[in-house]
Image (spheres, rainbow, N blue to C red):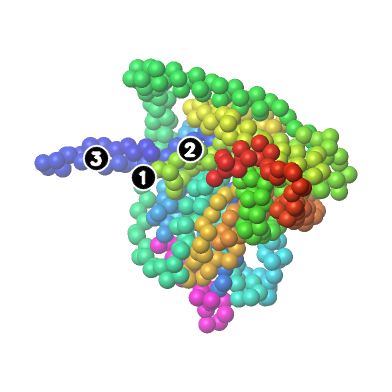
Amino acid sequence: MRQRGAVADGGREEFTIARYAYDRLSALDNSFLMFEDGRSHMHVASTATFDAGPLTTSEGGLDIDRVRDFVASRLHRIPRYRQKLAWVPIENQPVWVDDERFNLAYHVRHTSLPRPGDDRQLKRLSARVASQQLDRGKPLWEVWFVEGLEGNRFAMISKVHHCMVDGVSGVDLLEVLLDARPDAPCEDAPIYIPRGVPSSFELLRDEILDRVTAPLQALGRIVRDPRGAIGEVSESVKALGETVLEGLKLPSETPLNQEIGPYRRFDWVTFEIDQVKEVKNRFGGSLNDVVLTTVAGAVRRFLSRRRADPGGLTFRVMVPVSVRSSSERGTLGNKVAAWMADLPIGEPDPAGRYAKVCETTVRLKHSKQAMGAEILTRVTDWTPSTLLALGTRLAHRGLPFNLVVTNVPGPQVPLYLLGARMAEIYPLVPLFARLGLGVALFSYAGRLHWGFNADWDVVPDLHDFVRAVEESFAELHAAALAERDAEPRPGSRRGRDPVTLQVARSSA
């Protein structure tokens, strides 16, 4: 946060009035802006459904005025939602400034499906909303409230630019609007007073000063603790080397990795968490291992149906890893790094796939990939935007992964919006470059919600992939039950292999 102002004499005491204020985007946040073009829309999104009861009007519609008043009463907790982008001259570095013309009605939108609307129509509407880029001249978010769903339900389609928020921080934003109590009190909306916006000259001057002082601050830290600084640098160099080498390995080209267009398809499916835990408890490992194994089996099936040989392909997923500390929980901006994990899509046996996934995740847990990715983002925080733009263009030519799979843990208790219970919520991860499909998961109230975002032309058979996910998990679950029910042979010793035992002990 930059706050600048003049010191004024207030009689007996002096006080400082900040004439303007702004926040600088990190290099990671900025990269999400640079990845965006006419085909890549870099917003994260979700579609949630609610029981409409308490918010139903006498005419049977949704009380949108009450909803807007409620959103207004909570926005002071997330000030970024009233900020828009400004740009530092010459270097084109983006910053956040308060929007002096903020209009809540623009961001909180109201629409309806033809009654009685079903989930298929809602998926199509969600895909159309996801296909539209956010206006960079305004705060980068929208929430669409959709009435007309069968079963006296309504939906909430939220869309927030990735430069504002990562998945884990997004859970905190969700908590701002939703309550664990159906009768939570409504607050009075505080008056919004935007802070001053700096001029182009002031932005450029301040950024030059910050670039000059940043190396001096780093030098001061080395002088204060030379041994600790040297140890940290040594560890960082190792982590960077491991991360860069992994990023240089390109996976195989697949039918999912083609040039994308601007239009999207969105689909979803739900699993019971207790069933997912049955697999984890039988084979060891973690819930994320179950997810990655399920995806591996689904990719194997899907590519086989596309007449591609999964046995001859190297298929790699990028798994975002949160590096947000507990003290940073609820803060805006991105605090994520990544794992690069090869999926064993050539393995026909579901138990064998699971064992190989566990081996991979155990190795990644002991590697420094996530640390190296975090260091890279910190190093690039002071890299000129022109060089970041070059790196973004190079990334479009050869991504080191085929698919993004992100799994965000959510609350396991029901949540309410003004007394209306949220029944389901399906996340959406953005597509860019040559990624025709993205998989996002969110656990909520005992269920695991899968959201599948796909390019309209690259994956016209998206529902076949969703069915493949269901079939892959059913096969893995059946293998776990067979393992549980199998009788040990006389004189034999039942048990998991050492690798699986190690995973079981290390999982949360």
Say whether marks 3 and 2 touch (CB < 8 Å). no
From the viewer's perspective, tell me whether residue 460 is left or right of residue 202: right
Q: Residue at x 55, y 73 (%)?
A: 52
Q: Residue at x 52, y 82 (%)?
A: 58
Screen quadrant of the C terminus: top right
Which residue corresponds to mark 1? 196
Badge 1 crowding class, 10 Å Cα cut-off, few under 14, some 14 to 19, many 20 or more, is: some
Q: On residue 25, which mark appears? A: 2
Which residue corresponds to mark 3? 16
Q: Nearer the viewer, mark 3 or mark 1?
A: 3
Q: Residue furthest left?
A: 12
How far is mark 3 from mark 2, CA to CA?
Answer: 25 Å
Q: On residue 58, which mark appears? A: none
Q: Nearer the viewer, mark 2 or mark 1?
A: 2
Q: Residue at x 48, y 41 (%)?
A: 324
Q: Residue 144: x, y in percent? A: 57, 62
Taking the image as drawn, is residue 216 in sight?
no
How far is mark 3 from mark 1, CA to CA?
Answer: 14 Å
The region drawn magenta spans 53-73
Q: Nearer the viewer, mark 3 or mark 2?
A: 2
Give the total number of marks visible in the rendering: 3
Q: Residue furthest bottom?
A: 58
